[in-house]
Image (spheres, rainbow, N blue to C red):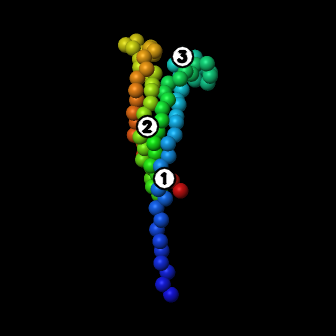
Amino acid sequence: MVTETITKFDNRVYIGAYTNFANTKPNSLFSISSYTWSESGLELLYVRNKMYYGVSAGLTQNRFDYEWARNSVIDGVIGLKFGFKLK
């Protein structure tokens, strides 16, 4: 009797959205009022077996002036992602 093993690749493409908040005021890290919007955008992930790869593009307010105070300028941001499944 011959046993044949078929390997199937699990390929998927995901699109998602993300938003981040940052501690921008000199209050406690545990105070909700010290956090303001920092960044938002869209991401595209390609998943194959136990690995994933992705790109993201969005808007950020993470620009600081020379005195390390956040100003109100909004910039574009791009990112690359990769990872693998642990189990």
Indicate the position of residue 23 as horizontal and vertical percent values: 53, 22
Asked whether 15 or 2 is in front, the reply is 15
Where on the picture, by quarter, is residue 21? top right
Residue 11 percent coordinates (x, y): 47, 56
Front-most of residues 46 and 67: 46
Q: Residue at x 52, y 40 (%)?
A: 16
Specify the amino acid type for callout 2.
Ser
Amino acid type shown at disc 1? Arg
Left or right: 81 in relation to 34: left
Q: Judging from the image, what secondary structure is the residue with disc 2 in?
A: strand
Q: Residue at x 52, y 34 (%)?
A: 18
Q: Which residue is mark 3?
A: 25
Label 3, residues with CA under 10 Å away: few <14, some 14-19, many ≥20: some
Residue at the spot 48% in from the left edge and 32% down from the top edge: 41
Pointer 1 local density, CA inside 10 Å: few below 14, some 14–19, many at least 20: few
Q: Residue at x 40, y 26 (%)?
A: 76
Can you see residue 83? Answer: no
Amino acid type, mark 3: Lys
Rounded to the nearest whole Å, what is the CA distance between mark 2 and mark 1? 17 Å
Query: Do labels 2 and 1 touch, CB within 8 Å?
Result: no
* Residue denoted by label 1: 12
Q: Secondary structure at mark 3?
A: loop
Query: Looking at the picture, does residue 28 appear above or below residue 44?
Result: above
- Residue positioned most to the top: 67
Name, please, the residue furthest toward the bottom.
1
Q: Earlier in the sequence, mark 2 or mark 3?
A: 3
What residue did someone put label 2 on? Answer: 56
